[in-house]
C-alpha cells in the first residue's frame, strides 16, 4: 500500500541527484525529447524543469486545451522569452496598439534594437488586408483589451495570420482560460500573467505560455538561458489558486455585469465600457466567443482629471492598486497608471481620457461594491 501526496508538494531543490552518471546523461536527453514524445522526464536542475513547476504547467495546459505549457517568473518573462524565441533580425511583428503597457514598451523600444520591426494596429485596423500588406512573422494581440475592453474576432485573426505564414500569439490574461480558449480559435500560443486571475490572490507573480510542444521547445531552450523560470513555491501557490479559478471568475463576471448595469444607469457616468452591455460595440462577438463578459469594467466619469481622482479616493471597498483579476476589487485611473507613458494623441484615439476609471471586480458581494460606487459618485 502506498499513499502519495494529494496536492503536488513543493520540490524546493535547485538540483537533483542520480546514483550513476549515465542516468544523468539519459535524463538530459529525455528533457529535450519530451517535446517530441510528450514522455515525462526526470528533473535535473530547476532552471530546466522542476516537478512542482511541471505540475502547474500541466494544469494550465489542460485549462487552455493546450498540449503543454511553460511557467515563468512573471507575465513579462513569459512574453519576452516567447517573442525572443521566434524573432530574428529583419523580422516584423504586427501588434495590437492597446496591448499591456510593458508589452508595448518591449515591442516599441527594445525589440527594434535588434533590428525587429513592429507595426501597431488599432482593434478595427487589424484586418486580413493589413496582414497581407505587412507580412509579419508574428501577430500579437489581446482580447478583451485594456482598458476599453474591445473584443477582437479571434478566429478571423488567427486564420489571417496563418494565411501569411505568421505565428499567432495572444495574451489571454484578461479573459482567463475559463472564459475563452484561444487555441480553439486557431491561435498558436497563449501567454498569461499568472499574477492576475490564475494566482488570483494578489500575492505571487508568475507567467505561462501554452501551445503545441513543437512551439514550446524553442521557448524552453531560451527560458533555460534567460533564466526567467517560475519558482517552485510560486508554482505551488498558483496551482492552489487554479482550483478555484472558474468559481472565482464566473462569480466575478456576474458581479461585473451588475456593476456595469448600475454605472450605465447613473447620471454622473458618461459611458460604460463592458462587453456584456448591449451598448458595447463588440457585444455580439463577445457573446459568441466568451463564456461570460469578463471581470473588468471601465467607465468615463462626468468630471475632469482632479474630480476623477477625488472620486477614486472616495472609494473605500475598492483598493487603489495596479493589478487585476484577483479576489479583491481594485480601481485605477488608466492615464496615471497603465497608460501614463502613452502619447496623449494615441490615448485620445483609444478613448482613454483623464476621466476614465478602470475597475477590477473581485469576489465581494455585488451590493457592497455598488454601494461603494454610489456613495463615491453621489458625494456632494
Ligand atoms: C499584468 C499583465 C502582464 C504582465 O504580467 P506580470 O506578471 O506583471 O509581468 C501582461 N499582460 C497583461 C494583459 C497583464 O495584465
Image (cartoon, rainbow, N blue to C red):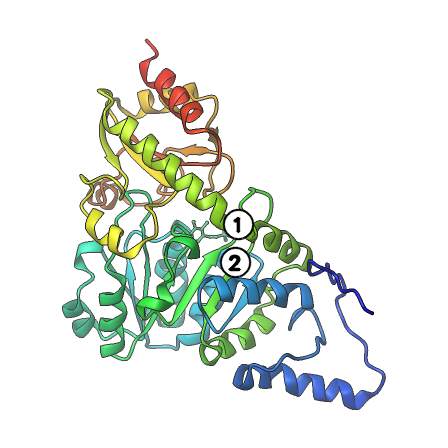
374 or 224: nearer the viewer = 374
Q: Which of marks 2 and 1 is nearer the N terminus?
A: 1
* Alpha carbons under labels 2 and 1: distance apart: 7 Å
- Using the image, determine if residue 319 lies above or below residue 344: above
Report the residue that reaches farthest toward the bottom.
22
Q: Quadrant of residue 360?
A: top left
Mark 2 near ligand 1 (CB under 8 Å)? yes
Residue at mark 1:
195
- Are the residues at dot 2 and dot 1 in contact (C-beta closer than 8 Å)? yes
Residue 96 location in percent, x, y?
Answer: 28, 58
The percent position of residue 251, horizontal first and vertical second, equals 44, 40
Q: Position of residue 69 (x, y in %)?
A: 52, 68
Circle 1 Cα neighbour tier, 10 Å, few/some/many (<14 / 14–19 / ≥20): many
Callout 1: SS:
loop
- One can see residue 289 in this view: yes
At 85% from the left and 83% from the top, the residue drawn is: 19
In the image, 116 versus 212, the foreground residue is 212
Q: Does the residue labelled 1 lie within 8 Å of ligand 1?
A: yes
Q: Which residue lies furthest to the top in this view?
A: 380
User: Which residue is farthest right?
Assistant: 19
Q: Which of 266 and 356 is in front in this view?
A: 266
Q: Is residue 157 left or right of residue 41?
A: left
Asked whether residue 112 appears in the rendered view, the answer is no
**SS for tag 2?**
strand
Q: Which of 203 and 244 is in front in this view?
A: 244
Residue 260 located left or right of residue 314:
left
- Estimate how packed mark 2 is, as few (under 14), some (14 to 19) or many (20 or more) residues with alpha carbons within 10 Å: many
Vertical position of residue 356 compared to residue 124: above or below: above
- Reading the image, the residue beneath label 2 is 207
Looking at the rendered structure, which numbered label has been put on residue 314?
A: none
- Counting from the top left corner in percent of width and height, residue 311 is at 36, 21
Task: Examine the rendered structure and indicate whether residue 299 appears above or below residue 235.
Answer: above
Amino acid at each position: 500500500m502506498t499513499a502519495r501526496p494529494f496536492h503536488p508538494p513543493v520540490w524546493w531543490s535547485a538540483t537533483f541527484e542520480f546514483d550513476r552518471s549515465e542516468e544523468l546523461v539519459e535524463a538530459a536527453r529525455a528533457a529535450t525529447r519530451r517535446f517530441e514524445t510528450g514522455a515525462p522526464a526526470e528533473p535535473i536542475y530547476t532552471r530546466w524543469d522542476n516537478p512542482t513547476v511541471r505540475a502547474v504547467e500541466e494544469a494550465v495546459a489542460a485549462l487552455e486545451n493546450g498540449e503543454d505549457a511553460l511557467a515563468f517568473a512573471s507575465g513579462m518573462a513569459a512574453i519576452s522569452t516567447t517573442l525572443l524565441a521566434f524573432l530574428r533580425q529583419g523580422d516584423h511583428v504586427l501588434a495590437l496598439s492597446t496591448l499591456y503597457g510593458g508589452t508595448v514598451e518591449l515591442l516599441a523600444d527594445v525589440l527594434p534594437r535588434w533590428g525587429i520591426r513592429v507595426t501597431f494596429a488599432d482593434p478595427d485596423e487589424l484586418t486580413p488586408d493589413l496582414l497581407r500588406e505587412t507580412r509579419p512573422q508574428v501577430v500579437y494581440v489581446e482580447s478583451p483589451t485594456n482598458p476599453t475592453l474591445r473584443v477582437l474576432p479571434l478566429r478571423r485573426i488567427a486564420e489571417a495570420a496563418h494565411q501569411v505564414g505568421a505565428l499567432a500569439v495572444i495574451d489571454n490574461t484578461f479573459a482567463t482560460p475559463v472564459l475563452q480558449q484561444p487555441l480553439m480559435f486557431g491561435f498558436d500560443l497563449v501567454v498569461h500573467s499568472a499574477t492576475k486571475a490564475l494566482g488570483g490572490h494578489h500575492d505571487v507573480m508568475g507567467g505561462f505560455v501554452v501551445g503545441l510542444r513543437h512551439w514550446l521547445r524553442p521557448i524552453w531552450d531560451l527560458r533555460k538561458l534567460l533564466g526567467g523560470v517560475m519558482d517552485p513555491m510560486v508554482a505551488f501557490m498558483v496551482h492552489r489558486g487554479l482550483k478555484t479559478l472558474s468559481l472565482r471568475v464566473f462569480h466575478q463576471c456576474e458581479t461585473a455585469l451588475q456593476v456595469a448595469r448600475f454605472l450605465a444607469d447613473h447620471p454622473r457616468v458618461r459611458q460604460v465600457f463592458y462587453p456584456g452591455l448591449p451598448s458595447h460595440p463588440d457585444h455580439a462577438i463577445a457573446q459568441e466567443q466568451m463564456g461570460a463578459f469578463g471581470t473588468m469594467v471601465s467607465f468615463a466619469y462626468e468630471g475632469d482629471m482632479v474630480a476623477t481622482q477625488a472620486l477614486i479616493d472616495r472609494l473605500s471597498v475598492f483598493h487603489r492598486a495596479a493589478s487585476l483579476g484577483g479576489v479583491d476589487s481594485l480601481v485605477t485611473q488608466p492615464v496615471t497608471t497603465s497608460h501614463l507613458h502613452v502619447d496623449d494623441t494615441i490615448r485620445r484615439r483609444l478613448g482613454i481620457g483623464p476621466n476614465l476609471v478602470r475597475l477590477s471586480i473581485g469576489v465581494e458581494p455585488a451590493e457592497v461594491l455598488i454601494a461603494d460606487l454610489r456613495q463615491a459618485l453621489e458625494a456632494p
